[in-house]
Amino acid sequence: MEARFRSTEDVFNDHLELAYSGDVDTDVSRNFAHDCVLLTSIGVFRGHKGVREAAGLLFAELPNARYAYRTRLVHDEMAFLQWTAIADGVRVDDGADSFLIRDGLIQVMTFHYTVIPNP
């Protein structure tokens, strides 16, 4: 059986829906290449284990976060997301992620955000 082609936009939207719902395991297995790389302001994370580690750090910094996706852009193999979040006692106003999506999987992802105390 031939696998259905997933466009950059298909993968990007699926990732955003799964990330929003907190379903990290499905997101990782369905949308990330086994040898993916995440480049972040806190370090470099590699492979599925690295994606799970980075997600765990994000959840710890932004407990019970409610995300708003502000800008979604897709061009060829690239996607970009601008986001904000409100969490328990903190917020993010400047979230920005970029993605290289090739052959139906996220190969490289970058993300940056600043955690701000929210009185």
Image (cartoon, rainbow, N blue to C red):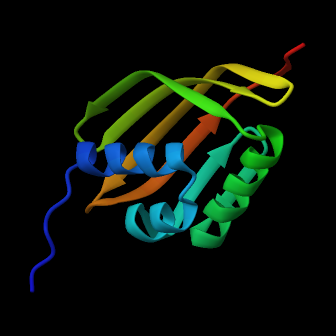
Direction from residue 55 to residue 7 in the image, left or right: left
**Residue 115 vs residue 34, the one in the foreground:** 115
Q: Is residue 54 above or below residue 116?
A: below
Q: Is residue 47 above or below residue 14?
A: below
Q: Residue furthest top?
A: 119
Residue that lies at the very extreme toward the bottom in this rendered image: 1
In this rendering, would 8 be left or right of 94? left
Q: Residue at x 48, y 37 (%)?
A: 98
Residue at image x 74%, y 56%?
56
Looking at the image, is 40 positioned above or below residue 34?
above
Give the quarter of the image for residue 61.
top right
Residue 43, position in %: x, y? 76, 49
| Residue 105 spot, x, y in % from top left | 35, 61
Q: Residue at x 56, y 58 (%)?
A: 37
- Where residue 89 appears, x then y in whole percent? 86, 25
The quadrant holding residue 33 is bottom left
Please identify the quarter of the rendering in which residue 49 is found: bottom right
Which residue is painted at 36% across and 36% down in the image?
79
Foreground pick, 54 / 62 = 62
| Residue toward you, 36 or 92 | 92
Q: Position of residue 64 (x, y in %)?
A: 73, 39
Between 21 and 110, which is closer to the camera in this rendering? Answer: 21
Q: Quadrant of the N terminus?
A: bottom left
Location of the C terminus by quadrant is: top right
What is the number of callouts on the image?
0
Residue 49 drawn above or below residue 109: below
